[in-house]
Amino acid sequence: MMGIVEAFVHFRWQDAVDILIVAAVIYWIILLIRGTRSLQMLIGLVLLILAFLISQKGKLMTLHWILNNFLSSIILIIVVIFQHDIRRALSTVGKNPFFFGAHSPYSAPIVDEIIDAALSMAMRRIGALIVLEREAEVDKYVEVGVIIDGKVSKELITTIFFPPSPLHDGAILIQGEKLTAARCFLPLSANPRVVKTLGTRHRAALGLSEETDAVIIVVSEERGVISLAIGGKLTRNLDASGLRRVLYNLFVSSKKSLDFG
């Protein structure tokens, strides 16, 4: 009891700031890896550390020796396991050093144009793959086909994906107010647990969402349904209200809260 009292007596304002900064960084890291395979790997690493402590307390010498040798290179292990997330985090911080005040590059009219285009193509069963870049740059993961650098509009998007168009294969890349490229090719998902029935478009959308924080819209040519890939997860069969709600929450609502904060 006396130890607790002494701790409070010697508690400085610098200690409070220190705790808040560490808590904020941990919270940001959890948000960064939430919904990705890295979260599962982090849980597995924590379980290994717990097993190490239990083997040490319980004097399980063989298990303790194995885990001790394994965890002795913990820094290298973390770098290897979380290399994609570390790269994404550094890219995000480099692009926006004050990441708590991130600003959405997508205005409500731009989001509406994208939604209208997706709904129109779904109704006509025109396959499409639309990449919306966020904080992390996707250039290193996307094989850019043709530079467009045009204003985002429903007409431009639907024209690109209309089957006779020479640009309809692959994905389009949207960066803020600009549709920067078409006929782009994305990395396919390497997740072994992905449903085998998923087509190439859906696997490509998942693949890019596993590597970056981009939002990828997929319109199925066979079924005429809309799916959304974010953070390594695929949400399928979105209707108009569902698609609008998700995109507005991601881009428009957060932007308004920052503008009027």
Image: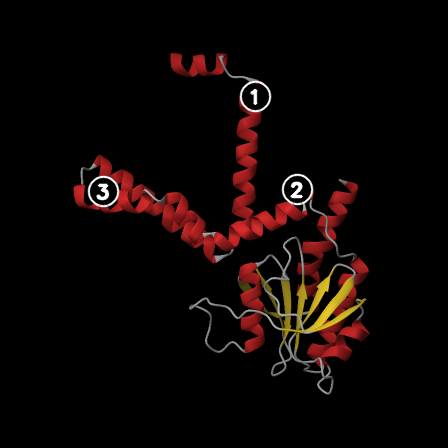
Residue where numbered disc 1 is placed: 14
Q: Amino acid at mark 1?
A: Gln
Residue 115 x/y as whole percent: 73, 67
Q: Which residue in the structure is indicated by mark 2? A: 97
Using the rendered image of the protein, determine whether residue 33 is visible from the camera's viewpoint: no
Say which label, 1 or 2, has the lower sequence index. Answer: 1
Q: Are marks 3 and 1 in contact (CB under 8 Å)?
A: no
Q: Which mark is residue 215?
A: none
Q: Position of residue 1 (x, y in %)?
A: 38, 14
The colour scheme used to paint the residues is: secondary structure
Give the image quarter of residue 200: bottom right
CA separation in Å, label 2 and label 3: 41 Å
Of the two numbered discs 1 and 2 in the rendering, the one whose residue sits closer to the viewer: 2
Q: Quadrant of the C terminus?
A: top right
Of residue 123 and residue 76, the one placed in the foreground of this image is 76
Q: Measuring 49% from the left and 13% from the top, which residue is drawn there?
A: 10
Vertical placement of residue 256 versus 180, above or below? above
Check if mark 2's residue and mark 3's residue have beta carbons within 8 Å: no
Density class for disc 1 (Cα within 10 Å; few <14, some 14-19, many ≥20) is few
Drawn side of residue 146 relative to residue 86, left or right: right
Q: Amino acid at mark 3?
A: His
Residue 134's spot in the image, x, y percent? 67, 56
Is 79 placed left or right of 183 in the picture? left
First in sequence: mark 3 or mark 1?
1
User: What element does badge 1 sit on?
Assistant: helix
Kind of residue at disc 2? Pro
Q: Which residue is mark 3?
A: 64
- Quote the CA–CA distance across marks 3 and 1: 38 Å
